[in-house]
């Protein structure tokens, strides 16, 4: 296993362009908006421990909601402290409250301390260790960003409490948490403090999963989360609640990396393949069913009921980035690119104010919604079709806050051979090998330029995008044929260099495996990393009545009219209305239309609208 | 309104051919097999009133199960008493038991009398009046067939009891039954006895529906049955539990017919259109959801979860035949033909021994079943994929028994102008206008010959099938152009005549309205009245990976190799397997195959098998 790591976001300054805009939107709008909604919904009051006084009841997730927001603020403080003074003040207030409220034994949970102190560490399904994990991550980030360790010390005391309850004294009523998160948080704490105890605790929670079943929602907890009986040394496929699963896999990846454990890594490779080759939407969304919010069976990828939680997009980034630190394989970066440009971006409205919890690949308001509404017991089974500013279970919005706040973490890997550009995100990047400058309009032209300055390694590698068919490159202005190996282009460089790459971006119709019933006979339009969709706003309702001839691709028009990105127009056909229910097939008639696609991630920004990713191919 | 009626089955002798075989199969195999299964499952013991002595508990439906079987036996006694002696003896035994068990006030219900006498007429959802209705229908049939009126008198006493409880003394806790049936039974009793009281009772139950809501299955009873708040004078669409709805509509049709009530008839016409143009499968199945076993919204016709209960096929026959007695419109006969050759026939295995409760239009064992099995709370949501000899709720098998036993009832209508052949079923038919002889191999060649003898009317009309594009006819050997009017061909005839018609049967690919999402881009193969399907047994699994070019129809081969009917073979294409989940669409590859279709009704006769009616059209 290679000793690799992503260059930390602290060393990465995003430069103007597509991703910097998203970063700024999060920093200037989303963080503030989530704060306001959390204040209104008394989430901060939970950690102020004045919740019951105000007549509200905290939810078992509230500590984690607030923690994720604080973690996001901490990342932004690290890059631009002045811009965050107001949010930092709130963080300090909350740390004051936590410090005051923490029990002498170190325990800290706003719900359990205020509402059910007799239930502490008694109910596996109650997210106590999940909340602890997010508070730990926030505390580490806050310490790094501010240099102040009060929050960190609070969490270290809490970790001691957890260690006693679960490991030393075994007073807890369960062994491993119902919702994973603490595992990877403990690895983060270990790496930050160097204290081996946290690594051992993480290993404990990872290796002791063996069937603490509890009843949940009519089925066993195992059916719901399905990581309960995981033996991490015999992991074969991706199962159960997708966020929990991916947090677990991320924790296992940390363990594999720390211990150089190839068995664990190989198991994770199998799981990674199971996800990306059988259980992932083209948008990088995962979680095929709302029922247990999870992975189901191979090729079960229904579009209109896709669960594809925004937290899953983030969790895939966590998992894939850890895998990339273990092994230099382009597929991890491919997945991260797919997630970034599609399921990750779709989670947030273009104005940065509202969010999706689920990110479906089809919306048909008049059809599916009407049908579902006709079934009394199944009402509201479909994903919501408009982004919301806050949810009852609002795990995603602050997770999105913290994700974009440290976006720079995903750009570039350094290992013993030099730097490796994984994501083409315009930025200035300081590394132990010197500075590189990435400039790109990647989503528009599929090109990037990388400048090196005082570069001390002999080579630099660039990931070749999954959609690229031919790489054209220049080195210091002259055409060059880089060495292509395992999905990367390797360039031999001196201390100063300019590499320009053109990955040959083009519109493509993508098909999915014939075993995916939902997509058979259908195609998705892609342009480089971006998956496209049809919306009712551009194409009228009943999007399934539109058929597209893939041969029309050569007549497609790209227009830079959609939030600085291209929309795509192409001749297509629409089935004409019929009066009868059944009729001779040759009586079907088509109206030629011009279909207009927009980037998938931008759907539902013009009011509630039908939307379709997988468009039917023209039939004979 | 015209005074029309179907020539009664007593006057119709089925002659050798397609339908006579089904009739004999029911008479010789199904009736006996259902009897055996009902004996084993103690259904007869319920009406022997020795149920609890044997340690069993009757089910609230048991009286109706037995009644339908008895009604079937009665119809067979009417045509061939010697063949039914053994079954007649059982009927007599059961009548003895009912006579002995009937309460002095006339009440008769095996479940309530034996298990919960304190609950009599207290719970609308308990099928008491539904059971009463089926017993009434059986009693009328038995009286007609045998001339013995013991059973009839029992039921007349029970009707008196019902009249007191619901109408005169109003001691019942509800007003109208949760499951309709008694309404049309009371009309039958009225027509048989001439006693106006029964007509008035029927009208009472039809007109008093106004919202006796009770909780059912988590929703209100109204949501489940949805006929609860029906004002029959403002009926607009088909809603709720399909069997209940269609029994209600049949009762309303009886009322419209008896009273010459055009408002009621016009409402029923609207409902009929709503069913046949928006809510009916191509097989004549109705009921799009298992959840309340009912009609949902227009164009919601999912294939693999189709509920399409066998009892609905029968109920559609009841409704359509009554509508035909009110008005001479070909669409009623069209619907009956569609039901007869498809959803009605599919209900029974080719050996006559086992039955379907649901009749789906798609089975994909490895796909849907695997997906459903992955969802803990939704297990076994899909229809069963093998016919069974008996069900826990076994309403369909004896309903099928009684249906085929009086199949002759649906052949020919007589009105003041003469006879009208509605269904081309080989038979000798006595009418008040003389005798006609229908000979046909209609399902094979789309032709029929009608001979008249001592025919006293001046014309005879023949329904032109919905699928017919051109009628060729001869009268007494000479080509003739009949008068075509409103879907019927009218022939002026003498007392003896021979009419031969050729409706130009041909294979056709049928499309469905573009609003039916499940079928868009797909076609169903039909041959005359018969809908075809693909089965895994002939075509391998993953039937959705097969594509058919409609232009290949001209190269199709008909082979008379499937239970004396044609199978159809045609060139088609199968998507080749792919390793990847997503790939460039132009990498899709096809293997030319020969696809083989069999009649839909014959599916699932060669073991459990994938099946598909709506086959994907070849895409560009």
Image: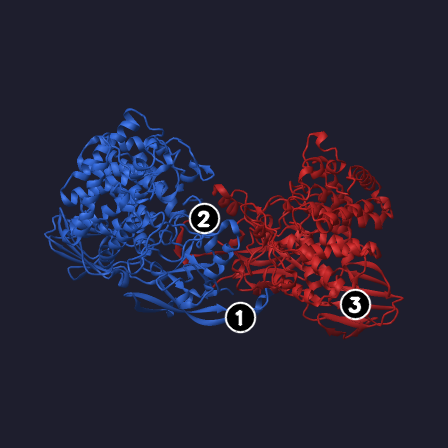
Chain colours: A blue, B red
Image coordinates for residue B382, horizontal then vertical, percent: 55, 46
Give the residue pinned by disc 1. Answer: A589
Tell if the residue under mark 3 belongs to the same chain as the one under mark 1.
Answer: no
Do the residues under discs 2 and 3 have CB atoms within 8 angstroms?
no
Identify the subunit bearing mark 2: A
Q: Is residue A553 visible?
A: yes
Q: Is residue A592 left or right of residue A208?
A: right
| Marker disc for residue B500 | 3
Locate residue A127: give its quadrant.
top left
Q: Nearer the viewer, residue A296 or A72?
A: A72
Image coordinates for residue A442, horizontal then vertical, percent: 25, 60
Locate residue A154: give its quadrant.
top left
Q: Secondary structure at mark 1?
A: loop
Report crowding for label 3: few under 14, some 14 to 19, many 20 or more residues within 10 A (C-alpha).
Answer: many
Q: CA distance from mark 1 to mark 2?
A: 32 Å
Give the residue pinned by disc 2. Answer: A300
Image coordinates for residue A349, horizontal then vertical, percent: 32, 58
Identify the subunit bearing mark 1: A
Locate residue A27: give its quadrant.
bottom left
Q: Nearer the viewer, residue B347 or A477?
A: B347
Q: Residue furthest right?
A: B454
Identify the subunit bearing mark 3: B
First-in-chain label (1 vs 2): 2
Q: Residue at x 69, y 37 (%)?
A: B117
Q: Is residue A576 left or right of residue A326?
A: right
Report crowding for label 2: few under 14, some 14 to 19, many 20 or more residues within 10 A (C-alpha).
Answer: many
């Amino acid at each position: 296993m290679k000793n690799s790591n992503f260059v930390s976001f602290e060393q990465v300054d995003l430069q103007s362009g597509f991703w910097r805009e998203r970063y700024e939107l999060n920093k200037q709008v989303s963080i503030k908006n989530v704060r306001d909604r959390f204040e209104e919904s008394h989430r901060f009051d939970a950690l102020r421990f004045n919740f019951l006084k105000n007549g509200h009841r905290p939810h078992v997730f509230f500590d984690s909601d607030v923690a994720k927001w604080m973690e996001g603020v901490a990342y932004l403080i690290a890059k631009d402290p002045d811009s965050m003074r107001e949010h930092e003040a709130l963080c300090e207030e909350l740390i004051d409250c936590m410090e005051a409220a923490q029990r002498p034994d170190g325990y800290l949970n706003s719900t359990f301390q205020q509402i059910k102190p007799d239930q502490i560490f008694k109910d596996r399904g109650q997210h106590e260790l999940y909340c602890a994990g997010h508070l730990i991550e926030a505390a580490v980030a806050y310490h790094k960003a501010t240099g102040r360790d009060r929050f960190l010390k609070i969490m270290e005391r809490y970790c001691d409490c957890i260690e006693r309850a679960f490991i030393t004294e075994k007073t807890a009523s369960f062994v491993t948490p119902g919702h994973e998160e603490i595992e990877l948080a403990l690895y983060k704490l270990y790496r930050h403090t160097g204290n081996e105890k946290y690594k051992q605790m993480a290993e404990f929670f990872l290796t002791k999963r063996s069937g603490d079943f509890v009843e949940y929602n009519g089925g066993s907890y195992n059916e719901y989360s399905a990581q309960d009986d995981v033996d991490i040394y015999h992991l074969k496929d991706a199962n159960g609640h997708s966020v929990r699963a991916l947090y677990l896999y991320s924790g296992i990846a940390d363990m594999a990396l720390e211990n150089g454990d190839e068995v664990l890594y190989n198991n994770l490779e199998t799981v990674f393949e199971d996800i990306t080759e059988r259980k992932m939407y083209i948008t990088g969304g995962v979680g095929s069913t709302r029922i247990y919010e999870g992975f189901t069976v191979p090729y079960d990828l229904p579009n209109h009921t896709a669960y594809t939680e925004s937290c899953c997009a983030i969790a895939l980034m966590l998992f894939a980035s850890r895998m990339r630190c273990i092994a230099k394989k382009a597929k991890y970066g491919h997945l991260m690119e797919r997630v970034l440009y599609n399921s990750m971006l779709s989670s947030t409205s273009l104005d940065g104010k509202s969010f999706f919890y689920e990110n479906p690949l089809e919306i048909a308001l008049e059809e599916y919604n009407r049908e579902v509404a006709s079934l009394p017991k199944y009402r509201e089974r479909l994903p919501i079709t408009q982004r919301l500013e806050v949810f009852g279970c609002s795990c995603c919005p602050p997770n999105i806050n913290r994700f974009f706040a440290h976006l720079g973490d995903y750009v570039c890997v350094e290992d013993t051979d030099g730097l490796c550009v994984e994501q083409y995100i315009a930025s200035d990047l300081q590394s132990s090998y010197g500075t590189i400058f990435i400039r790109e309009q990647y989503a528009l032209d599929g090109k990037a330029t990388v400048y090196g300055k005082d570069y001390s390694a002999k080579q630099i590698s660039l990931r070749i995008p999954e959609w690229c068919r031919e790489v054209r490159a220049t080195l210091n202005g002259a055409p060059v044929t880089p060495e292509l190996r395992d999905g990367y282009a390797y360039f031999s460089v001196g201390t100063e260099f300019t590499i320009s790459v053109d990955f040959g971006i083009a519109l493509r119709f993508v098909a999915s495996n014939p075993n995916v019933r939902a997509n058979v006979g259908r195609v998705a339009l892609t342009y480089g990393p971006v998956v496209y969709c049809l919306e009712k706003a551009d194409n009228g309702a009943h999007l399934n009545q539109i058929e597209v001839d893939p041969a029309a691709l050569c007549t497609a028009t790209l227009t830079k009219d959609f939030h600085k990105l291209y929309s795509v127009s192409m001749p297509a056909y629409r089935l004409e209305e019929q009066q009868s229910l059944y009729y001779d097939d040759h009586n079907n008639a088509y109206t030629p239309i011009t279909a207009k696609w927009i980037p998938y991630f931008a759907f539902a920004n013009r009011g509630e609208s039908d939307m379709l990713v997988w468009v039917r191919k023209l039939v004979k």
